[in-house]
Amino acid sequence: MGTITKRSTINKSTVAVKAYDKVRLARNNHRPTGMDYITRIFDDFIELHGDRKFADDPAIVGGLALLDGKPVTVIACEKGHTAKERAYRNFGAPGPEGYRKANRLMKQAEKFGRPVICFVDTSGAYCGIGAEERGQGQAIASNLMDMSALKVPVISIIIGEGGSGGALALAVADEVWMMENAVYSVISPEGCASILFKDAERAEEAAESLGLTAERNRELGVADRVVEEVFARNGFDPVVYENLKILLSLRLKELEQLPADELVERRYRRFRALGNR
């Protein structure tokens, strides 16, 4: 395993960035998706499909992989890049079968003692009639409950948008990390503005109040680490994936040293403490 390196192809501006500018960056069509992280960080990824109840949800990708030679379970929201891919992936909005698939894979990981790594990038769970009829709320609630009690290490990384319960359903983790230009919030700025101001055009104003940036989430204790983004000509510089791989490997080794009961208790205390800052 190598050492963490740092290389930049652009100069970081010292000018303060508005919260809504971060939202735009998080939603950018050229931003790396879950599969980009999986293919660049892990070896021998084997995708597993289906929730064993209804169908396979392309908005959630999950399976087995090797991280520095160690078996792990990887689960990711996937938006796709092209218009065709995005339509197929339902623009990264999972249905209940997606969350049930994730839940199945996490329980499987617990059975075989594999750590779980989640990459979260969704504006929210799909809110169509069919999804509600098939138990969207129950599927999300089950994930929240079951993730809180998993007896293996769990790290969730917000890589783009982290929207509402649809994101939280994959983020009840021992540690929650955020990419530098990711956002994480209980509601979108547009939704917040529509409710509070009765005007979605005031989304920029709402974004400032929501505290949705990576740095603000870290200040509040919602996020444990902010991962720097370094850009090259076509997306992230490879150093971003190299560093993230090293960080994940090192932190999982530390978490695996903890007894299972202590791991669960620490996770419980982590979420009970939110809102105290």
Image (cartoon, rainbow, N blue to C red):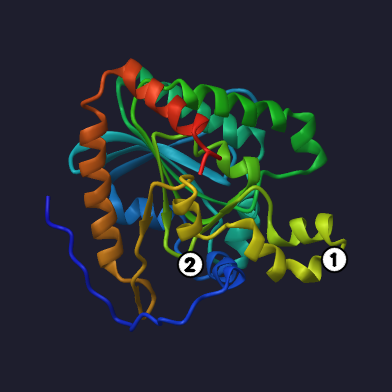
For badge 1, the amino acid type reads Asp
Write the residue at 18% across / 59% down. 4
Q: Residue furthest right?
A: 198
Write the residue at 73% across / 28% down. 135
Would you identify the image quadrant in which residue 11 lies? Answer: bottom left
- In the image, which disc is placed on residue 31? 2
Write the residue at 46% across / 25% down. 268
- Depth check, mark 2 against mark 1: the one in front is 1
Write the residue at 82% across / 39% down. 129
Which residue is nearer to you in this view: 145 or 118?
A: 145
Mark 2 to mark 1 CA distance (whole Å): 28 Å
Q: Position of residue 149 (x, y in %)?
A: 46, 20
Residue highlighted by disc 1: 199
Would you identify the image quadrant in which residue 243 lies? Answer: bottom left
Q: Earlier in the sequence, mark 2 or mark 1?
A: 2
Q: Is residue 21 above or below residue 245?
A: below
Query: Does residue 201 appear to the left or right of 182 in the view shown?
Result: right
For badge 2, the amino acid type reads Arg
Which residue is nearer to you in this view: 246 or 220?
A: 220
Disc 2 crowd rating (10 Å Cα; few below 14, some 14-19, many 20+) is some
| Secondary structure of residue under mark 1 | loop
Q: Position of residue 36 (x, y in %)?
A: 40, 58
Q: Is residue 20 above or below residue 34?
A: below
Which residue is nearer to you in this view: 14 or 162?
A: 14
